[in-house]
Image (spheres, rainbow, N blue to C red):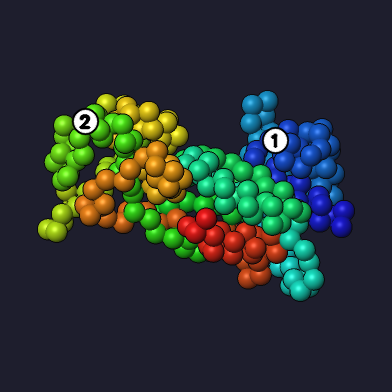
Amino acid sequence: MDKLGTLGIFIQVAEVGSFVAAGHRLGISGSAVGKAIGRLEDELGVRLFNRSTRSMALTEEGSFFLETCRRIQSEYDEAQSRLSRSQAVPRGQLRVSLPLAGMLLMPTLSAFMTLYPEINLDLDFTDRLVDVIEEGFDAVIRTGEVRDTRLMSRKLGTFKHKIVASPDYLQAHGHPKVPEDLLRHRCLHHRFANSGKLEPWPLIRAEGEMKLDLPVTTVASTLEPLIYLAERSFGITCLPPFAVASEIAEGKLISLLTDYLVDTGTFRVLWPTNRYLSPKVRVFVDYMATHLFTE
């Protein structure tokens, strides 16, 4: 088991490129990580990393050894999972990456935490394209299609955006009846953090997609400020349904132009390809697929 632990330390260092960062992940000191790698290199008789004061990178031998270590770790995890599947209680740390809008999924995530108290969630909220395997995530929730062949995926649900405004705003400025009416309203927009582009409002007519040059009153790179401003009558905004479900149910926001919107988003959960899922990943995938769009 000591050798298996050392291989795990090596994998972490290779993924993050730093003894200190690997130590943070593993809960040990950077010095302890460095000594473990030194002992491993002495035992193998090769240098695994080229080190400098500013960076470290795998040697050719280190790259070869990394692939071997990942295969060993994967086979061990699969064997452990298969042997313990029937009796194991899902437990341990579960590293999950979510988009920034994933903050609005917290009711579902907190319900999962209540149901599985022995699973400790490590949640990373970012809109950047993370490398699930290299960065050590157990699962990732994202929208869009899957292009990484190293990953398995499961569709969580398809959603249609909501155009919403507060009752007070609509009383003061009128209800838009057709998409062109939006041209006379204060429009609150979401900007993608990665590209800097405004998220288009997915408007359609019977003949197809519509593209309107909507007024840009306010722009935000996350969804929460847009909800806040819409509730307080600063304008009309277009958001995914899970972001505004409770506000619509409570009458704080009113859904508009529903007949002119098209399905635009698909949530998926992704995880590294393994023949046998660990219990903690399996229950997380199953729970999110069952409950994300029903709670």
Locate residue 5, reporting x and y percent.
Answer: 82, 52
- Residue 161 vertical placement versus 52 (above, below): below
Residue at the extreme right? 2
In-front residue for pair 233/96: 233
Q: Name the residue: 70% across, 45% down.
A: 12
Q: Residues within 10 Å of mark 1 (few under 14, many from 20)?
A: some
Q: Residue 228 occupies which quadrant of the picture?
A: top left
Look at discs 2 and 1 and give the one toward the viewer.
2
Q: Would residue 190 be visible to someone looking at this image?
A: yes
- Residue 83 vertical placement versus 154 (above, below): below
Amino acid carrying mark 1 in the image: Ala
In-front residue for pair 190/182: 182
Instruction: Name the element at disc 1.
Output: helix
Q: Residues within 10 Å of mark 2 (few under 14, many from 20)?
A: some
Query: Marks 2 and 1, how far apart in space?
Result: 53 Å
Locate residue 118, reporting x and y percent.
Answer: 76, 54
Q: Residue 147 occupies which quadrant of the picture?
A: bottom left
Left or right, 162 with reference to 243: left
Q: Would residue 47 be visible to someone looking at this image?
A: no
Left or right, 221 with reference to 7: left
Residue 150, label in figure: none
Q: Which residue is mark 1?
A: 21
Q: Name the residue: 54% across, 64% down.
A: 290
